[in-house]
Image (tube, grey):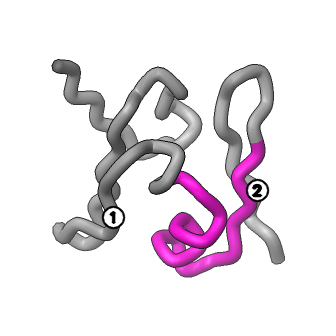
Amino acid sequence: TLLYVTHRVEEILPSFSKTLLLKNGSIHSKGNTEDVLNNINLTSFFNRRVQVLEYNNQRLLRFII
């Protein structure tokens, strides 16, 4: 088991099977990484419209104005 803590979504590797997002000291969402790191969930997490892009097997975020 590996516990990886980061403030950067880009660092969450595709090989990580589970992801937990904490917001203001509470669990915002948890589950399979591909289910947690999606446009709808991350838009709710950041309170800003977000698009999740994949490039070279890495997730990138684009904040939409």
Vertical placement of 19 versus 17: above or below?
below
Indicate whether residue 40 is drawn in magenta.
yes
Task: Examine the structure image and report whether residue 51 is included in the region drawn in magenta.
Answer: yes
- Eyeballing the image, is 47 above or below 14? below
Cα separation, mark 2 vs mark 1, equals: 20 Å
Disc 2 target residue: 62
Residue identified by numbered label 1? 29
- In front: 12, or 65? 12
Identify the residue shown where x is 28% and y is 29%: 4
- Are there few (<14), some (14-19), or many (20+) residues within 10 Å of tag 1? some
Which residue does the image show at 60% across and 58% down from the upper left? 38
Q: Nearer the viewer, residue 15 or 48?
A: 15
Q: Residue at x 65, y 64 (%)?
A: 39
Q: Residue 8: image x %, image y %?
A: 49, 42
The magenta stretch is 37-53
Secondary structure at badge 1 equals strand
Considering the image in quadrants, where does the N terminus appear?
Answer: top left
Residue 19 is drawn in which quadrant?
top left
The number of discs equals 2
Q: Give the mark nearest the N terminus, 2 or 1.
A: 1
Q: Is residue 36 left or right of residue 52?
A: left
Tell me the SS state at disc 2: strand
Q: Is residue 65 left or right of residue 22?
A: right
Q: Residue at x 46, y 55 (%)?
A: 36
Q: Mark 1 belongs to which amino acid?
A: Ser
